[in-house]
Image (cartoon, grey):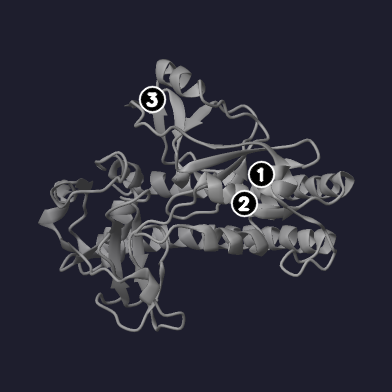
Amino acid sequence: MRVKLKDITKFSKGTQINGKNLIDDGAYSYLNGGINPSGKWNEFNVSENTVTISEGGNSSGYVNYMNDAFWCGAHCYYLYDGPKNSKYLYYALKSQQERLFRIRSGACMPNIKKSDLGNFIIEYEKDEVRQEEVVKVLEKCELLIEDYNKKLTLLDEAVRARFVEMFGDLRINDKGWKYYKLDELTELITDGEHATPKRTTQGIYLLSARNVLNHQLSLEDVDFIDCDEFDRISRRIIPKEGDVLISCSGSIGRCCIVPKNIKFQMVRSIALLRFKSNINPVFAEYMITSDYLQNQINKSKTASSQANLFRGKIKSLKGVVPPLELQNQFASFVQEIDKSRLRELLAIKQIKLLLNDSWLLLY
């Protein structure tokens, strides 16, 4: 049966905590929207086994499930007094993740209104025995995805280890490289469109910070523009293969290379770096995601409710320039690892499709 969310559960936002006051060794996670907790706190205001939905920011609409008690912030909805099987409600909402993203409002700071969330319609099985059957099937799929993600983590660790082996720990510079500002290592450092683009339901990709992950672009939740808007924005900059992108709003410092055969434009929450010929973009990407550069980035971010990283700060970040031959050797190693990573990602994608198909078949 189809029901409105407000007819089967209650929901509310939590209470904000200043990020400066978070406790490193707190007993409870602090979830303030987004995909992952923002830190730790010494109290909880929401009990375990709770479904949450991000209310504001680049990840508004993201559905999460908190196994343990946690502190819920003001940019996150938590659901309560709903179905006895809260995991079933989680899967019911997670199956409609893309639809939830589409009920966001607001351009600069997307958010989901309480009324829109309450009127959100999902498929819902009232029979509790049937709910339990659904949960068992989908939990098995999630365990498979978890196994593949562990393999991806091992591949990432292999690349990081090779980076340190070839270039040393840049925090202590045990190889003795000379430091340069990124402004000296690049032909161009810019960001995306500052004015609010006219979005469409299909067309050319319009990327924002949420689409830039470490070492990959995510196109699961992406906006679009038409050709006229693309041409207008492109008068400023046209991204091309080999450019390096950095997320500059919210979860700042994530970095990936522009891959082949993708046409897109971007908003100002993404910075674009075009490195000089003596820098291999793959090396640059992993240098930026190293602890050394990430520490600099964290010190450079603005102190506000949503972190930002501006062009001037990016230009002042410092990196190194090992011999190009060494950089190219590292890039070749990454290319081989990426082949294995692609196999794991394809397996995860197939399981996620099975998840969606299973949800439909169960009805």
Are the residues tagged 2 and 3 within 8 Å (C-beta)?
no
Indicate whether 11 appears above or below 281: below
Q: Is residue 26 visible?
A: yes
Q: Position of residue 100 (x, y in %)?
A: 28, 45
Q: Is residue 350 visible?
A: no
Circle nearer the viewer, 1 or 3: 1
Q: Residues within 10 Å of mark 1 (few under 14, many from 20)?
A: many
Instruction: Write down the residue under mark 2.
Output: 316
- In this view, the residue in front, 192 or 125, is 192
**Left or right, 253 with reference to 197:** right
Q: How many marks?
A: 3
Q: Position of residue 215 (x, y in %)?
A: 62, 48
**Could you say which quadrant of the image residue 91 lies in?**
bottom left
Amino acid beneath label 3: Gln
Amino acid beneath label 2: Ser
Indicate whether 182 appears above or below 261: below
Q: CA distance from mark 2 to mark 3?
A: 37 Å
> Which mark, by number, is residue 143?
none
Instruction: Write down the residue under mark 1.
Output: 183
- In this view, the residue in front, 39 or 203, is 39
**Could you say which quadrant of the image residue 34 lies in?**
bottom left
> Which mark, by number, is residue 202?
3
Secondary structure found at label 2: helix
Q: Position of residue 52 (x, y in %)?
A: 29, 62
- In this view, the residue in front, 123 or 18, is 18
Amino acid beneath label 1: Asp
**Left or right, 97 with reference to 85:** right
Q: Residues within 10 Å of mark 2 (few under 14, many from 20)?
A: some
Q: Residues within 10 Å of mark 3 (few under 14, many from 20)?
A: few
